[in-house]
Amino acid sequence: MDLLFNNETRKLMLTRPSKRNYNELRKIILDTKVSPYAEGSCLARFGNTHVMCTASVETRLPPWLRNSGKGWVTAEYGMLPRSTHSRMDREVSKGKASGRTHEIQRLIGRSLRSIIDLKKLGELQIKIDCDVIQADGGTRTASITGAWVALYDAINFLLKSGKITENPIFDQVGAISCGIWNEKEILDLDYEEDSTAETDGNFVLTASKGIVEIQTTAEQKPYNKLQFLKLLDLADIGTNQIFNIQKKALGLN
């Protein structure tokens, strides 16, 4: 796809709230070992969206996996009450998690299980907790990106402690939002853009060019195939940069 910098994109830079180019990520910082107690941890910052991701190793497995020789990776997701512009009640005070929360934590779990050999993990379970400290759009994509780093950090702990002998992670996974805003395809939407986008989507991709999941929704008029392919191209651009940031955070470069 033609993603050349031209007069149209210069004009868009002046109109995006963040003054970013259409194919430009927010500043992404992935800090590791930010929790002294978790086996793996990462504070993922996508601009003003901040998510604490921790990975906890347990010997308890779901009943259907006991004595199977396989492990499990699962995830939970939540938002702190004042992670948004106005306070929200904790879901525990309502007695149950929302449908949105269930959807996101299942997405995180599926994304991580797509890049790990559960047999090599052995009969261990790794639980990923993604807690949104501050939300400015893209909390689920920041969660997936940071969760992979936290998971890798926990796997390093297991390898060093001798609890496993092989690294079961065989690929990287990352996620980014793309959308159509002001009739232009753009990368990494913040809240102001996301809340007014004509189309918004989340792309979960692997470093080996695999697709784990794509969620795209037309909020106004339907989008066409060409527009979708432009969004996918932008997601490739964004996740390629994210994979490098993940490796740098873990000292893998």
Image (cartoon, helix red, strand yellow):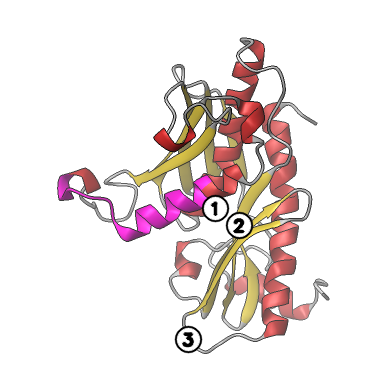
Determine crowd level at label 3: few under 14, some 14-19, many 20+ residues with C-alpha closer than 10 A: few
Kind of residue at badge 2: Ile
Q: Is residue 43 left or right of residue 174?
A: left
Residue beneath disc 3 = 220
Q: Main secondary structure of the magenta part?
A: helix
Q: Which mark is residue 176?
A: 2
Determine the CA span between mark 2 and mark 1: 5 Å
Q: Which residues are magenta?
A: 93-109
Magenta stretch contains residue 227:
no
Kindly state the secondary structure of the residue where label 1 is placed. helix
Helix, strand or loop under label 3: loop
Image position, residue 33 (x, y; %): 55, 23
Mark linked to residue 141: 1
**Marked residue nearer the N-terminal end (2 or 1):** 1
Residue at the (68%, 28%) spot, across then down:
250
Q: Nearer the viewer, residue 1 or 173?
A: 173
What residue is drawn where x is 40% and y is 46%? 134
| Image position of 169 with respect to 15: above or below | above
Quarter assignment of residue 155: top right
Q: Of callouts 3 and 2, which one flags the residue occurring earlier in the amino acid sequence? A: 2
Residue farthest toward the bottom in the current orientation of the protein: 221
Q: CA distance from mark 1 to mark 3?
A: 23 Å
Mark 2 packing: few (<14 Cα in 10 Å), some, or many (20+)?
many
Does any portion of residue 84 appear in the rendered image? yes
C-beta proximity under 8 Å, tags 2 and 1: yes
Badge 3 amino acid: Gln
Residue 14 drawn above or below residue 150: below
